[in-house]
Amino acid sequence: MKKAVLAVFLVFFAYLPAQSFSQGVDPLAKLEALKSRLEAVAGMLGEETRTASDRLSEGDVREDEVRSVLSDLCGALAYSVDCTYVNENGVMTYVEPEAYRIYEGKDISSQPQFVKANASGRAVFSGVFRAVEGFDALDYEYPLEDGSGRKKGTLSVLMKPADFIKLALGPEMDGLPYEAMVLQTDGLILFSDESEIGRNVFTDPMYRDFPSLLELCRRVVKDATGEGTYTFVGRRSQEPVEKKAYWTTVDVGGNVWRLLLIVED
């Protein structure tokens, strides 16, 4: 789980050949459709976790019951990696599925999303962080309380950003040659072509020779909406081509993300 929380702006790049727009695809309308889809999937995460917490709100915490709830929760959320009951002291007490039980007993009491959820009694959707499971993750932390308000720990849903984004955007991207890129404010690419995930757009040599791309990314981080052009390697030609970007802002569980559509000439 979490070592540090970053304030995150995530950038979604969807690359669409210019002729597709001329065939009636409105980039601004598509942005709104993608935005609505992301918000809806985040909302479903909250609903599923709330339902799971209700099943554990009364009585003492029993292992068999908790494991059943965790298994059902992970089963309902296709993008989840593992689901965890974290006790009131911040210890990962029960983890499902079985392959991830090796992390039971880990102390995450200092992780900001646990601290905030446990103290406030409200759900917290973390920024991207390095999980104890060994990968960069998002964590949805939901507090558990009984009917009298006694704190009983939290439920945690851990996911890889790329899996969450792919499930959210997939239905809107089907049939269109989109690519998506997620960019954190420090420049780390969280979702894109496999060859780009984990690179930093501001420091990686891959992007050094494309100043217009770097300038666009700086604008996207700064401005809630906008459009602009830049040059980068084409998806079809593998040669530098000009692209045009349209973007808007999405708020997913308190994380402010930038959502873009890119037209490639």
Image: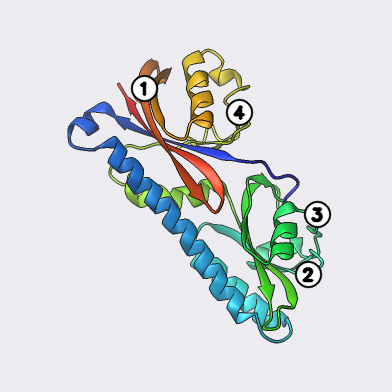
| Inter-mark Cα distance, 3 to 4 | 27 Å
Corner quadrant of residue 41: bottom left
Question: How many marks are shown on the rendered structure?
Answer: 4
Residue wearing tag 4: 200
Q: Residues within 10 Å of mark 4 (few under 14, many from 20)?
A: some
The amino acid type of the residue labelled 2 equals Glu
Q: Secondary structure at mark 1?
A: strand
The amino acid type of the residue labelled 3 equals Ser
Q: Look at the numbered discs 3 and 1 and tell me whether their residues touch, using CB distance below 8 Å.
A: no
**In the rendered structure, which disc, 3 or 1, sits on the residue that comes first in sequence?**
3
**In the rendered structure, which disc, 3 or 2, sits on the residue that comes first in sequence?**
2
| Inter-mark Cα distance, 4 to 1 | 20 Å
Q: Nearer the viewer, mark 2 or mark 4?
A: 2
In the rendered structure, the answer to whether residue 149 lies left or right of residue 89 reads left
- Image location of residue 64, percent across then percent down: 68, 82
The amino acid type of the residue labelled 4 equals Asn
Q: What colour scheme has been applied to the protein in the rendered image?
A: rainbow
| Residue 132 seen in render | no
Q: Residues within 10 Å of mark 1 (few under 14, many from 20)?
A: many
**In the rendered structure, which disc, 1 or 2, sits on the residue that comes first in sequence?**
2
| Inter-mark Cα distance, 3 to 1 | 43 Å
| Inter-mark Cα distance, 3 to 2 | 12 Å
In the rendered structure, the answer to whether residue 67 lies left or right of residue 19 reads right
Residue 243: image tag = 1
Residue 88: image tag = 2
Q: Residues within 10 Å of mark 2 (few under 14, many from 20)?
A: some
- Image location of residue 89, percent across then percent down: 82, 67
Residue 14: image tag = none
**Location of the C terminus (image quadrant):** top left
Residue wearing tag 3: 110
